[in-house]
Image: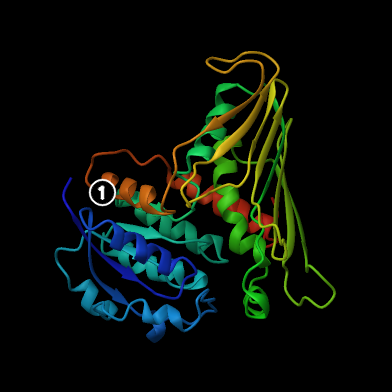
Amino acid sequence: MRKLKVVQIGIRHEHASGKYKTLKKLPDDFELVGMVDEKEFATTPTFLPAGDATFELYKDEKFFTLDEVFAMRDLDAALIEVPNLDLVPVAMRFAERGIPIHVDKPCGEDLGAYKQLLDLAESKKLPFQMGYVFRCNPGIRFAIDAVKSGMLGSVFMVETNMNHAYGGEVYKQYLKTFKGGVMFNLGCHLIDFLIEMLGRPEHVVSLLKGCSADDPSLSNTLAVLEYPHTHAVVAVASQDQMQKRRLRIEGTNGTLELCPLEHFKGRGLEIALKLKEDFGNYRAGEQTVGFPPEYDRYAAQLLEFSAVIQGEARDRYTREHDYTVHEVTLAAGGYIKL
């Protein structure tokens, strides 16, 4: 495959610096033509994990205006990394011009506006990728396959969390700007793979609180996705000092647990699996399923995006899936009823 010419639109999304670092690790696959600083047009709240040091990261890059980017004739794709509530209107401007887009999460608080973006991408057959972080995660892929193949029997309970303990008071103030709090901001990553695993739920229960009496934000959140025979519990809290994000699935033929959900420090993920009866290559009883080490959170996903753009791979996700994920995310965050 050839090297793609890409631009990164925005440096203020929580994942913007990570996407930038990944692009720089893949010089044979991507030529980063330059960046756009969204300060001239972004109007919604943001949180910079590294504070002012974020801007130092990009000091050697070329910066363009949006109009200068739109004038480029050989651009292959754009990564939209503006603040959450600016994602859809900015992405729409690229979709209108037929430019393939990778869009970070979550895509705003207006489901109708997001649907317009997805419909436009669909009508133009435009390569479109959402930036949910677990899409290429090998442990999550195994878990999805385990449920769909029937390895675990009839699944009756799924529990997963996206807890953390970063950001301090600045992050609390940031979360206050979202009606759905930290469920809206982080729960979407979990909901993405739950929808792929289980489909659209029949009903969603949303519980949103602060972690303590003096916490002004919705930092202690939980949602229950109800299915005919399954409860899927999604928890996101901002004061978990262990910070061990996990997934546990229980079925009539077995239980699967992945903790942590991701790891990039030289050792691979491990799944604890216990089966009542043999299934394929997996025996009855307790066993560990290991995976090779991964070294980057975003590389596999961006390489998949490149392959889709160049016709070397099929998009694994439909726009209907993307819509359902955001619909359920908004229900989990208390914006809509489902």
Query: What residue is rendered at 48% in x and 36% in y?
Result: 291
Which residue corresponds to the image point at 73% horizontal and 69% vertical from the top-left? 218
Q: Quadrant of residue 163?
A: bottom right
Residue 104, how many percent across, how many down?
A: 45, 61
Q: Where is 252 relative to 300, above or below? A: above
Decide which of 6, 162 is in the foreground and name it: 162
Location of residue 148 in the rendering, given as x and y in whole percent from the top left corner: 56, 27
Left/right placement of residue 264 relative to residue 218 reads: left
Residue sitting at 59 percent across and 37 percent down?
199
Which residue in the protein does label 1 denote? 309
In which quarter of the view is residue 249 placed?
A: top right
Of the pair 215 and 121, the residue shown nearer to us: 215
Tell me the colour scheme of the image: rainbow
Q: Looking at numbered disc 1 in the image, what kind of residue is underneath it?
A: Ile
Q: Position of residue 304 (x, y in %)?
A: 33, 45
- In this view, the residue farthest toward the right is 213
Name, please, the residue furthest toward the front.
266
Q: Secondary structure at mark 1?
A: helix
Note whether 140 is above or below 119 in the view shown.
Answer: above
How busy is the neighbourhood of tag 1: few (under 14 within 10 Å), some, or many (20 plus)?
A: many
Q: How many marks?
A: 1
The N terminus lies in which quarter of the figure? top left
Residue 255, by quadrant, is top right
Outermost residue on the bottom side: it is 40
Vertical arrangement, residue 225 with respect to residue 84, above or below: above
Q: Position of residue 55 (x, y in %)?
A: 39, 81
Q: Nearer the viewer, residue 270 or 193?
A: 270
